[in-house]
Image (cartoon, grey):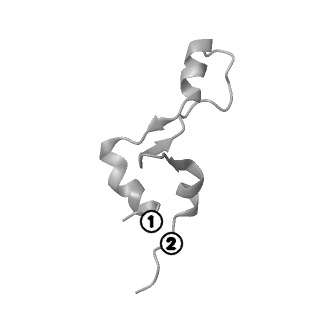
Amino acid sequence: MPKVKTNSGAKKRFKISGTGKIRRKHAYKSHILTKKSKKRKRNLGYFADVEPARLESTKLLLGMK
């Protein structure tokens, strides 16, 4: 049986934490930032956990299943 290849797009977009959680970046923080508040931009800068509904498909893309 062949090896499972990691999806190269997912490899760049997701990080796995030390405890095994899959982390993702927030959207809407690349351009047109002048109309967004400082608080909103700060909160968009932090990582977020992948939602439980998308966890299985994300694990498949990362070759964790």
Residue at x-position 54% and y-position 38%: 25
- Give the quadrant of residue 43: top right
Residue 10 appears left or right of 31: left
- Horizontal and vertical percent position of residue 50: 41, 42
Residue on which disc 2 sits: 5
Residue at x-position 58% and y-position 30%: 28
3 versus 32 height, above or below: below
Nearer the observer, 33 or 47: 47
**Crowding at mark 2 (Cα within 10 Å: few <14, some 14-19, many 20+):** few
- Horizontal and vertical percent position of residue 58: 41, 54
Can residue 17 be seen here? yes
- Horizontal and vertical percent position of residue 41: 60, 21
Which numbered circle lies on residue 35? none
- Residue that extends furthest to the front in the rendered view of this protein: 18
Question: What element does badge 1 sit on?
Answer: loop
Nearer the observer, 31 or 62: 62
Q: Which of marks 2 and 1 precedes in the sequence?
A: 2
* Whether label 1 touches label 2, CB < 8 Å: yes
Task: Please state, as top left, top right, bottom left or bottom right, where the C terminus lies in the image.
Answer: bottom left
Residue at x-position 47% and y-position 60%: 62
The three-letter code of the residue at mark 1 reads: Gly
